[in-house]
Image (spheres, coloured by chain):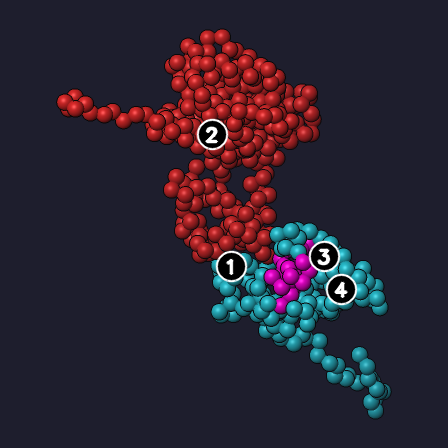
Chain colours: A cyan, B red
Amino acid sequence: MTGSPDRSGRAALRLVPATAETACPSQWFCGHCGAPPPTNETPAPPARVCGECGLGLLLEARADAVPSPNEAFLIVDGSLSVCALSATSEKLLAVSETDVVNRPVMELLSPADAEANAPESLAAAIMWAARGEDEPRKVTVRPANVFGVRMPLRVGACGPPRAALLVFDDAR
Amino acid sequence: MRYLKTSEAAALLNVSPNTLRAWERRFGFPRPQRSPGRHRLYTHGEITALRDALLDGLSISSAVSRAREGLGADTNALVGALNAFDGMRADSALEGALALRSLDRAVQEVLLTALDEVARRHGTDSVQWAFAARWGNGWLRRAQRLVTPPMQPLRIVLGDASRDDLDPDAAYIRSLELLATRAGATVLGLSVRGVANMAEVLATHRPDAVVIAGSAQSDDAVARWAYAVRLATGPLPVATYRRGAQRQRVRTTGAAILPSVPGEAARHLMELAAHRVVDTQDRTPTPRMAADGA
């Protein structure tokens, strides 16, 4: 609390910026092809299979974190294990989803942000997102077995159940 | 064991039949069996396991992985029971597996897998293996006694070249006998160590195919037995099962080599015997009428 003394010598209250989060709409998308469902309504639990590709489950995320259809992204849970890989990511990283599911994400991606404390920033961003911190964060990564490549990544929350959504920015 | 058609399984999972077939191609799960008309038949246990995993999964891949782990828990339970020398618990574990799978799958995916795991962990000269092998072979023999009488006129003679119940091949050979019997054939199992009076036995049994299974007996002993069978029955289709990789390089007189998986081996054996029956029928001369109509 800050203030300047008024004529009586008491400090006055000053209005501070609002701390409430601005409401951000959420959107559903397919965890394999990224396509949105026909309606943005919450699907029933037994009806979460994507009607477009049939190979992914419908997940929800903030509208500013949701990948566009056919964008490269992956889903990672709180134990840093890969849970889903989009079709475009399979081509980008030259792996098959069935080969990497339940494997540690660090076997696929390594931090490439030299300025930050690299080993923690990617893992920390994923764990914050998996715990429900849905403010998107930006990190830079490279494929685990490739050097000299930097790929910007935005990390946000998705679910259910709660997990981290990693979207490759400007990657096709 | 409850089976579901493709449409029923798809309805239970709330997907289209095409999606279900696409999952089978991409993930190899669920794995349907085939009806005699080659239609897919899904086990109810696999479909419900997958449905439950999809309810709180993040992807189809992770749900498939969880469903597989759940079904694989039966093998772990059986291995645990065998390691604890608890036959009743082992029986319960296999009964639990039968609730989710057909008998053929339970034998191949749970019983034989568990025996292999015990052999791998403790060795085939261990007490654990001695108990597990005895239990496994006993269970397979009991299961064979419960098989309904055969419907097909196929008869198979199986020459058992295994050492004894502790032979790692013995359970596979019992499984082949069981699955071939369930497929409708009459299987006569004889040790290759007995060759006397072969003609008497085979005069009654009249086999359509012969299979020599196991690798413990020498090639000479097996050859003597096979020769006795041939003398008694004439030329017959011959197949070998788990005769050992080195013996597969030995030239045989056209003997088929059956796959190691008992289910596939039984299917190949049935085809071999069925071809022989068809060939025999084709070669049977059709009677000709004499000029006077006799």
Query: From mark 1 to mark 3, how far is it between C-alphas?
Result: 25 Å
Residue A33 left/right relative to B33? right
Q: Where is residue B174 in the image (x, y as percent from the top left)?
A: 52, 24
Q: Is residue B53 above or below residue B130?
A: below
Q: Front-most of A55 and A20?
A: A55
* Residue B154 drawn in magenta: no
Foreground label between 1 and 2: 2
Q: Where does label 3 land, which residue?
A: A108
Are dots 4 and 2 in contact, CB under 8 Å? no
Q: Name the residue under label 4.
A: A141
Instruction: Tell me the SS state at disc 3.
Output: loop
Residue A81, placed above or below residue B119: below
Magenta stretch: give its range: A71-94
- Mark drawn on residue A54: 1
Tag 1: amino acid: Gly
Along the horizontal axis of the image, is B244 left or right of A154?
left
| Chain of the residue displaying label 2 | B
**What residue is disc 2 on?**
B269
| Residue B142 visible in this rendered orientation of the protein | no
Are circles 1 and 3 on residues that touch, CB within 8 Å? Answer: no
Between the residue at mark 1 and the residue at mark 2, the CA separation in whole angstroms equals 39 Å
Foreground of the two, B222 or B33: B222
Question: Quarter holding the N terminus of chain A?
Answer: bottom right
Q: Residue drawn at (65%, 76%), measured in percent from left and top? A: A22
Q: Earlier in the sequence, mark 1 or mark 3?
A: 1
Amino acid type, label 3: Leu
- Report if residue B76 is visible in the image: yes
* Residue name at image x 45 percent, y 55 percent: B18
Local crowd size for mark 2, using a 10 Å CA cut-off: few (<14), some (14–19), many (≥20): many
Q: Do the residues labelled 1 and 4 touch (CB within 8 Å)?
A: no
